[in-house]
Image: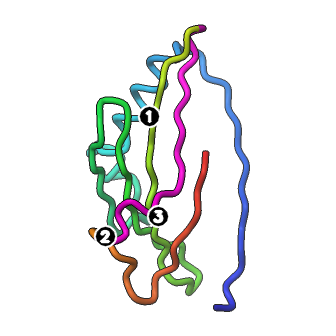
Amino acid sequence: DGEKVATGFASTVVDTSAEECAAYRILFYNSREAKKNMKHVLNDKVVPISDASFYYITTREIGFFFNPREGRSKVTWKKEEDGKVVIDVSDTQDLTEEYPLKEGNVLVSVHS
């Protein structure tokens, strides 16, 4: 479709417990604070799966005359025996029928 591909990398150091970081990140997905501050997000939806996972469906405007980007992610978290918390965000096709790709939008791939 003639559009470019971009890749980004980031890391950070946080001075708090793993549980606090995980709780903030997980709760942030469906918070009023997130929705208020993310002007580039045209549409987003959180669909619970279990106490340790949910689906996150989003449409984002990236500007510069690019078509909007849609993502379908499954977010899963787990506390390991050593106290570390792992949060996995990966692509999913589970909601393709319930939330089809809108015409003209581009489906993005994500894993973090």
- Quadrant for the N terminus in the image: bottom right
Q: Residue 103, how many percent across, how many down?
A: 40, 88
Q: Amino acid at mark 1?
A: Arg
> How many angstroms separate mark 1 from mark 2 (CA)?
24 Å
Q: Which residue is mark 3?
A: 71
Counting residues from the start of the chain, the first of labels 1 and 2 encountered is 1
Mark 3 and mark 2 in contact (Cβ < 8 Å)?
Answer: no
Q: Is residue 45 above or below residue 14?
A: below
**Is 91 one of the magenta-colored residues?**
yes
Which range is magenta?
A: 82-97
Q: Residue 71, how many percent across, how many down?
A: 47, 64
Q: Residue 82, how many percent across, how many down?
A: 60, 8
Disc 3 packing (10 Å; few <14; some 14–19; many ≥20): many
Q: Is residue 14 above or below residue 43?
A: above
- Residue 99's disc is 2
Q: Nearer the viewer, mark 1 or mark 2?
A: 2
Q: Residue at x 54, y 14 (%)?
A: 16
Q: Quadrant of residue 96?
A: bottom left
**Is 92 one of the magenta-colored residues?**
yes
Q: Amino acid at mark 3?
A: Gly
Q: Which residue is mark 1?
A: 25
